[in-house]
Image: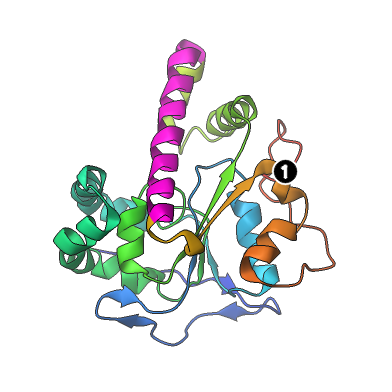
């Protein structure tokens, strides 16, 4: 059973918002939403905050472990089908109705939000084809980061959050194997992003780590003026010099 969402988002003035219009019709989210789909430790939290400050959305959904656990059995089958699909069009044609039916609870849970920088709808636990089916107007953002810096940050994050990453001990036991597993994860998720970009290039933005120093690239993508304040820097670990 999909758990009832905990709506604790903040609007532009910092107020808590607990409800809003029902943005769901025929099993899909009908308004534009904004999905940061690169892996963790690529500035995704910072980009989520930046999107709120740009005004493209008011509610940023953070990590929801219970919701992710609830949908994992469905995700295994649907992600496998998406990986095997020849294109997004083919996947939507052959599996769209199934995705909408099996992910109906997820859609109800996430519908109050416009921005997703973390799991289950952000990051990469859910194949991007599924997300495009469930949110046809979605914008997808990917952030590239230097591989060595990213691996150092991931290791630090996992080793300092052992309750979330029980396999963190592999960094000490077999660091190269653990690093190679992370490289494979990156490559697989980047391929997914590039496949949806081929289908809908106008809905996809690929940033470099240096683009998180200021507002230029993100604001230009949305056709908005850059804010006068500094680009937000959030979730920074001790090994990271900029956005985490």
The percent coordinates of residue 199 (x first, y second) are: 37, 58
The percent coordinates of residue 194 (x first, y second) are: 43, 47
The local secondary structure at tag 1 comes to helix
Q: Does the magenta run of residues contain 176?
A: yes
Residue visible at 66% across and 72% down in the picture: 223
Residue visible at 41% across and 24% down in the picture: 181
Identify the residue under disc 1.
210
Q: Is residue 176 positioned above or below 89 on the image?
A: above
Any part of residue 66 in sight = no
Residue 104: which quarter of the image? bottom left
User: Which residues lie in the magenta part?
Assistant: 172-198
The percent coordinates of residue 27 (x first, y second) are: 26, 75
Q: Main secondary structure of the magenta part?
A: helix
The colour scheme used to paint the residues is rainbow
Front residue of this view, candidates 51 and 85: 85
Q: Does the magenta run of residues contain 9?
A: no
The percent coordinates of residue 228 (x first, y second) are: 85, 67
Front residue of this view, candidates 221 and 96: 221
Residue 1: which quarter of the image? bottom left
Front residue of this view, candidates 123 and 128: 128
- In this picture, residue 144 sits left or right of residue 229: left
Front residue of this view, candidates 43 and 198: 198
- In this picture, residue 73 sits left or right of residue 12: left
- In this picture, residue 6 sits left or right of residue 225: left
Residue visible at 61% across and 73% down in the picture: 56
Assign the C terminus to one quadrant of the image.
top right
User: How many marks on residues?
Assistant: 1
Any part of residue 5 in sight = yes
């Amino acid at each position: 059973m999909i758990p009832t969402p905990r709506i604790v988002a903040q609007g532009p003035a910092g107020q808590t918002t607990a409800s809003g219009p029902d943005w769901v019709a025929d099993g899909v989210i009908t308004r534009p939403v904004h999905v940061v789909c690169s892996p963790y430790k690529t500035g995704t939290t910072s980009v989520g905050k930046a999107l709120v400050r740009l005004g493209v959305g008011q509610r940023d959904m953070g990590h929801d472990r219970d919701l992710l656990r609830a949908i994992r059995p469905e995700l295994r089958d649907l992600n496998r089908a998406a990986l095997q699909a020849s294109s997004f069009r083919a996947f939507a044609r052959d599996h769209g109705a199934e995705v909408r039916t099996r992910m109906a609870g997820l859609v109800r849970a996430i519908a109050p939000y416009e921005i997703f920088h973390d799991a289950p709808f952000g990051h990469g636990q859910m194949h991007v084809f599924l997300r495009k089916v469930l949110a046809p107007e979605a914008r997808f953002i990917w952030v590239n980061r230097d591989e060595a810096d990213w691996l150092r940050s991931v290791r630090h994050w996992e080793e300092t959050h052992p309750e979330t990453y029980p396999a963190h001990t592999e960094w000490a036991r077999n660091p190269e194997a653990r690093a190679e597993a992370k490289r494979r994860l990156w490559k697989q998720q980047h391929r997914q992003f590039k496949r949806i970009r081929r289908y809908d290039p106008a809905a996809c933005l690929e940033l470099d780590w240096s683009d998180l120093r200021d507002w230029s690239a993100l604001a230009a993508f949305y056709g908005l003026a850059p804010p006068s304040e500094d680009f937000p820097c959030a979730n920074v670990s001790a090994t990271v010099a900029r956005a985490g």
